[in-house]
Amino acid sequence: MKKQESEVRKTVVKIRMNADEKKSLKKWQQQSTERNMSNYIRKVVLQKPVVIQYRNQSADDFLRDMLALKKELNAAGNNFNQAVKKLHLLDKIPEFRVWLNMYDNSRKTLLEDIEEIKLRMGQLYQLWLQK
């Protein structure tokens, strides 16, 4: 697909900046939806609209907390799973068999609940990423 003659950019414009100015320009460009510095500068210079990404700080904080909770839930599930596996080694004692069966059912319920929480958190995370 060939660009029309009016779309081809042949003219190069150079500017000089110090390190702080370049850092500031890069920061502004990264806050916009423009991924290319040339497009960002072109829009600013030609006074075209530049879309700035808006982040909801309270939503970001909530998401960070939920991700930390997800890690803790995974760790709790793993620890519980390891404990039940170790108890399986003691199944030769009759009293442990009853206790083991009871906690094996609890383990399955806990792991199902953790998976449900992880699924819902993933859906919530994807929803926030779209905004």
Image: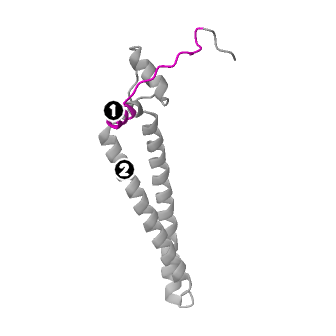
Label placed on residue 64: 2
Task: List x then y, in percent, for residue 39.
Answer: 48, 23
Which three-letter amino acid code belongs to the residue tagged 2?
Answer: Arg
Q: Which residues are magenta?
A: 6-26
In the rendered view, tell whether residue 35 sits above or below residue 44.
below
| Residue 9, magenta (yes or no) | yes
Query: Helix, strand, or loop for circle 1?
Result: helix
Question: Who is closer to the viewer here, 6 or 48?
Answer: 6
Q: Which residue is found at the position 51% from the left and 82% from the top?
A: 87
Is residue 110 placed above or below 85 in the rendered structure? above
Q: Give residue 21's mark.
A: 1
Q: Secondary structure at mark 2?
A: helix
Mark 2 touching mark 1, by CB under 8 A?
Answer: no
Q: Is residue 82 magenta?
A: no
User: With respect to residue 47, does 38 lie above or below?
Assistant: below
Secondary structure predominantly adopted by residues drawn in magenta: loop
Q: Amino acid at mark 1?
A: Glu
Name the mark nearer the viewer: 2 or 1. Answer: 1
Q: Which mark is residue 69?
A: none
Left or right, 116 with reference to 7: left
The answer to whether 101 is drawn above or below residue 73 in the figure is below
Q: Residue 102 location in percent, x, y?
A: 49, 75
Q: What residue occupies the far top of the structure in this picture? A: 6
Q: CA distance from mark 2 to mark 1?
A: 32 Å
Rendered-image quadrant of the N terminus: top right
The residue sitting at the left extreme is: 58
> x, y percentage for residue 47?
38, 14
Residue at image coords 33%, 32%: 21
